[in-house]
Amino acid sequence: MNEAEFRRAVEFLKALVRVPSDNPPGNCAPHAAAAAKLLEELGFAVERHPVPPPLVARHGMRSVTNLVVRERFGTGTGPTIALNAHADAVPAGEGWSVDPYGAVEKGGAIFGRGAAVSKSDFATYAFALRALNAAPADLDGAVELHFTYDEEAGGELGPQWLLDEKISRPDLAICAGFSYSVVTAHNGCLHLEATVRGRQAHAALPETGADALEAANAILSALYAERTKLARGKSKSPGIGSPTLNVGLISGGINTNVVPDRVTLRLDRRFIPEENGAKVERDLIAQIKKAAAGRKAIKIETKRILLAEPLKPLPGVERLVAPIKRHAKEVLGVAIRETGVPLYTDARHYAARGIPTVLYGAGPRSILEANAHGADEHVRLKDLRAAIEIVTATLRDLLKS
């Protein structure tokens, strides 16, 4: 791409970073409005798809408007390819050396919350589509931009909602990723809340109560023993590693001089593609209840917060992997690998519909290098340019008439 077009992509990304879209709290409709205007200034017709407020509220957010852009080429009988990126981002937090919403450009990179994950791929995909529109000869099929706003809350209001509502029915999907690998698998994730209920009593007479914290301590010991056991298992998918278990939140108790009657734990269980989410959930609940069994007046309640199934390679995914790897080597000068990642993404929603899906976009070799979800999150300009060029060339291959 020429320098003028690339600078336009850079300014487009900066404008997106300057509009906060923190999730939580998840009031993302204002960012969608700003993004839609920017896309229209690029010459696209933008569909705005607001998610009904009651559904948004049930998912703990305040507002969601998904954006869809559709461009057809030739007879339109070729494949429809969805390009999905999300613009909701975790809150900025502390420790930044620059304004997290300033879109500061320095040292060959753009810094800001969401710059890497994944506002950069709004730019990757929009400018790849612009390149196709500028030279559409010999193309047949369609490209859709799916720009969504709830990945940090699970993606049910973004890609899943677009697919459930039959707003889109793509044949292939490319979702936000990084430039030096093409991802075909990722972990699943279970978020589970476990509430331990006992009976309060005066601290001078603890035997007259049922200590929920004492029971929770036994549960924690069992969970940490399970974490050690999980670390011995390994996925066959490169890049994913072992299942993990984390207790991220604990709350409860009444006062220092009262036997606690309730303790609540929030758990994060990451499971590898070889595992089944429903079985992981059943087994974890059984372990929690077993650890508390036999304790007087202790009851256990569990509630699923999130169950995200893993991404697994589907038949046909090689149609995406092969051209991405080929063009990446041409543009980057190095071979990129096909791999998995130990987290979960919106890509799983496309794969769940039988749509061959990969993750590929603008960024370095790892989340850690980009400081994604951390202070001074950034994307390098050379990686953004490379991703635009690679995705453009890949789309041309896929849409050849």
Image (cartoon, rainbow, N blue to C red):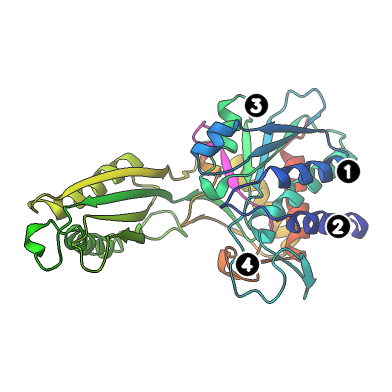
Magenta span:
349-362
Q: CA distance from mark 4 to mark 2?
A: 20 Å
Sequence-earlier tag: 4 or 3: 3
Q: Residue 357: within the magenta?
A: yes
Tell me if I can see residue 268 in this picture: yes
Q: Which residue is mark 4?
A: 370
Name the kind of residue labelled 1 in the image. Glu
Sequence-earlier tag: 4 or 2: 2
Q: Is residue 257 above or below residue 301?
A: below
Question: Horizontal and vertical percent for residue 20?
Answer: 69, 55
Label 2 crowding class (10 Å Cα cut-off): few <14, some 14-19, many 20+? Answer: some
Sequence-earlier tag: 4 or 1: 1
User: What residue do we see at 78% from left, 46% from top?
Assistant: 34
Q: Which mark is residue 167?
A: 3
Name the kind of residue labelled 4 in the image. Ala
Mark 2 or mark 1, which is nearer to you?
A: 1
Q: CA distance from mark 2 to mark 1?
A: 15 Å
Viewed as shown, does residue 196 lie left or right of 160? left
Q: Which residue is mark 2?
A: 6
Q: CA distance from mark 2 to mark 3?
A: 31 Å
Could you say whether the residue bearing mark 4 is in a helix, strand or loop?
helix
Name the kind of residue labelled 2 in the image. Phe
Comparing 247 with 378, the one in front is 247
Label 1 crowding class (10 Å Cα cut-off): few <14, some 14-19, many 20+? Answer: few
Name the kind of residue labelled 3 in the image. Ile
